Image (cartoon, rainbow, N blue to C red):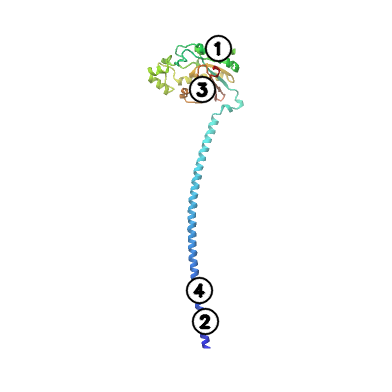
Amino acid sequence: MKADSAARADVGVVKADTGARADVGVVKADSAARADAGVVKADTAARADAGVVKADAGARADAGAVSADAETRAAQAAKAGADTRAAKTVAAPGWAPADMGAPATFVLLRHGETPLTPQKRFSGSGGTDPSLSDTGREQAERAAAMLARRGTIQAVVSSPLARTRETAGIVAARLGLDVSIDDGLRETDFGAWEGLTFAEVRERHPEDLNAWLASPDAEPTGGGESFAATATRLAATRDRLVAAHAGRTVLLVTHVTPIKTLVRLALGAPPESLFRMELSAASLSVVAYYADGNASVRLLNDTSYLR
């Protein structure tokens, strides 16, 4: 009995020891598992942090792109708004409301050639006032025939100089109209440059010529008329004629500088644009003037009928 009890006791000890070892194993396993779990968690957290950093960087990049895109869109919207405001400020004449009425349409005819024209000499209102050459009279006849075919001219107004009065007379006779004279349509006074070529003026008056080319306020040598003064005169003449001929088509027979100036003012172009327009003898240009002050250039330097 004692031996059996001892054996049972030994078995119990073995079981207890085995249980303890098992518990220790469990504890170790649990600790290892916890450690592994900690590593996993740490690794997961690190990965998560890295993901957050990447996501944050991506978000910042996206935000930067969105911001840049937003700025671009804002700039485009601002420009579109400015364009819209400009369009509202200066309405396109072609889209003028019907209740604005028909415009005053000026058909601008440069006089035919004079003996000075082919030589490209300054020929203003302060010179010899030459008449038309044979070529100039033929040009006037051709212009008259073309305008008669159109049949739209209702009045003829001319500069007081001989070459324009002669051109206007030829055209008006074909149209069966009288000629009115308006001093505001005269050519610029070129002072001491009258009758000279550009090269001759360059040789004789280089400083005055350079100043004249650089500024619309500069006068030709000898007290001629500046382009600024010519523009002021032509603007007043235009306003007076527009008021007198609202809704009508009027032939204005005039000169190079007045026609270029009327076109420049209609376009709102700078003074130096006068040097960038070609205007042949006996050529036609057309500008329409509306009641709200807008203007539309419809034709420039047409000489097709002369060929």
**Residue drawn at 38 percent across, 20 percent down:** 206
**Residue drawn at 51 percent across, 87 percent down:** 3
Q: Is residue 200 above or below residue 53?
A: above
The residue under label 2 is 11
Neighbor class of circle 3 (other Cα within 10 Å; few <14, some 14-19, many 20+) is many
The residue under label 1 is 170
Asked whether the beta carbons under mark 1 and mark 2 sit within 8 Å of each other, the answer is no
Q: CA distance from mark 4 to mark 2?
A: 18 Å
Three-letter residue code for mark 3: Val
For this orientation, the residue located farthest to the front is 307
From the image, state whether disc 3 or disc 4 is nearer to you: 4
Quarter of the image for residue 250 reads top right
Three-letter residue code for mark 2: Val
Asked whether the beta carbons under mark 3 and mark 2 sit within 8 Å of each other, the answer is no
Quadrant in the picture for the C terminus: top right
The residue under label 3 is 263
Note whether residue 43 is visible.
yes
| Residue 210 locus on image (x, y percent) | 40, 22
Q: Earlier in the sequence, mark 1 or mark 3?
A: 1
The residue lying toward the viewer, choosing from 22 and 240, is: 22
Looking at the rendered structure, the secondary structure element under dot 1 is: helix
Looking at the rendered structure, the secondary structure element under dot 2 is: helix
Q: Earlier in the sequence, mark 3 or mark 4?
A: 4
Count of labels shown? 4
**Residue drawn at 49 percent across, 54 percent down:** 52
Q: Which mark is residue 23?
A: 4
Q: Earlier in the sequence, mark 4 or mark 2?
A: 2
| Residue 36 locus on image (x, y percent) | 49, 65
Asked whether the beta carbons under mark 4 and mark 1 sit within 8 Å of each other, the answer is no
Q: Earlier in the sequence, mark 4 or mark 1?
A: 4
Neighbor class of circle 2 (other Cα within 10 Å; few <14, some 14-19, many 20+) is few
